[in-house]
Image: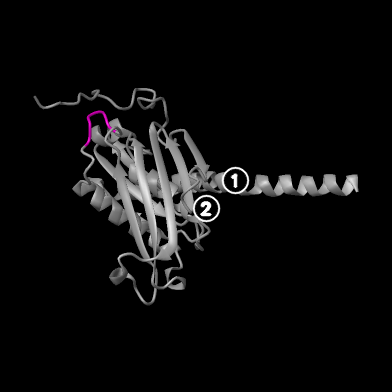
């Protein structure tokens, strides 16, 4: 028997609150950690709502197989993968067509910030593992992957930040969760570089009017700016704290001397 999901008739109540209590322009609670994996060159972990996503980066390193190496720049490879236990129903561990698509769009969203020309004949591998899925995983995965690249010490122009906007109950809202994504009317994932305002990912599923599209895009951009602040804070927590501790140790040693 086919499993059919049942969704509520209304996703926004009369007071303007969504099912999880958020207003139209609110992000889900976000937790970000940098440097969570010891064996990777760079890594990051993000929780966004019920999403739990891990990103790891290896490289730049010698490209394998060697015939894929490019003489003028590094080869950027991204793998987006959902764990079999990440969804309500068990997912096949084999890569799906959707995962191949999201691997491609993730690579295209990250490539513009990297100085790939500085590392010819090498590869940079980005792995995004969805441990638990609750909608918006492509955007949250890009946020984590961008931090993992920075954690690996790979030169970047800016951090890539991403979030989706969409339409539910004929209203434009920010950061759709799984129910809103599946039962809503439209979805607009956006990735961008906050400093320049350049957009590196823009997809759309569903239908918007021209005004609705502009409203959704502007709402997503504002959401990206908020997430960008969280990304920078996560990097500071990892790298600023050790420097401050070392500075305090130096002061203590000077006093003792």
Which residue is the extreme one toward the bottom?
71
| Residue 39 higher or lower than 83, as above or below | below
Residue 251 visible (yes or no): yes
Question: Which residue is depicted at the point 29% across and 69% down?
Answer: 68
Which quarter of the rendered picture does the N terminus lie within?
top left
Residue 219 visible (yes or no): no
Say whether residue 208 is magenta: no
The x, y position of residue 169, in whole percent, is 27, 32
Q: Are marks 2 and 1 in contact (CB under 8 Å)?
A: yes
Tag 1's secondary structure?
helix
Left/right of residue 151 with respect to residue 5 in the rendered view: right
Question: Which residue is depicted at the point 33% across and 64% down?
Answer: 64
Viewer-proximal residue among 6 and 39: 39
The x, y position of residue 118, in whole percent, is 47, 72
Q: Which residue is mark 2?
A: 151
How many badges with numbers are in the image?
A: 2
The x, y position of residue 195, in whole percent, is 51, 58
The Cα atoms of the two marked residues, 2 and 1, are separated by 9 Å
Q: Which of the marked residues, 2 or 1, is nearer the chain's N terminus?
A: 2
Q: Which residue is mark 1?
A: 238
Question: Which residue is depicted at the point 24% across and 46% down?
Answer: 205
Q: Which mark is residue 179?
A: none
Which residue is the extreme one toward the left?
1
Q: Which region of the structure is painted magenta?
A: 87-91
């Amino acid at each position: 028997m086919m499993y059919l999901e049942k969704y509520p008739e209304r996703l926004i109540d009369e007071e303007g609150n969504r099912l999880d209590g958020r207003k139209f322009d609110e992000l889900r609670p976000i937790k970000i950690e940098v440097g969570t994996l010891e064996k990777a060159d760079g890594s990051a972990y993000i929780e966004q709502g019920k999403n739990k996503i891990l990103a790891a980066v290896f490289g730049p390193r010698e490209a394998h197989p060697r015939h894929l190496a490019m003489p003028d720049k590094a080869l950027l490879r991204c793998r987006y993968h959902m764990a079999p236990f990440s969804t309500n129903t068990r997912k096949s561990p084999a890569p799906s067509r959707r995962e191949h698509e999201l691997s491609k769009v993730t690579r295209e969203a990250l490539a513009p910030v990297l100085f790939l020309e500085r590392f010819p004949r090498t590869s940079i591998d980005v792995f995004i593992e969805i441990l638990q899925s609750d909608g918006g995983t492509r955007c949250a995965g890009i946020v984590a992957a961008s931090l993992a690249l920075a954690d690996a010490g790979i030169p970047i122009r800016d951090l890539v930040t991403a979030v989706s906007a969409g339409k539910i109950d004929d209203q434009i809202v920010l950061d759709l969760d799984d129910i809103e994504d599946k039962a809503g009317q439209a979805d607009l994932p956006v990735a961008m570089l906050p400093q320049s305002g350049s957009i590196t990912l823009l997809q759309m599923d569903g239908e918007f009017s021209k005004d609705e599209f502009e409203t959704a895009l502007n709402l997503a951009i504002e959401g990206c700016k908020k997430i960008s602040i969280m990304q920078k804070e996560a990097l500071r927590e990892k790298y600023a704290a050790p420097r401050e501790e070392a500075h305090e140790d130096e002061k203590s040693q000077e006093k003792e001397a």
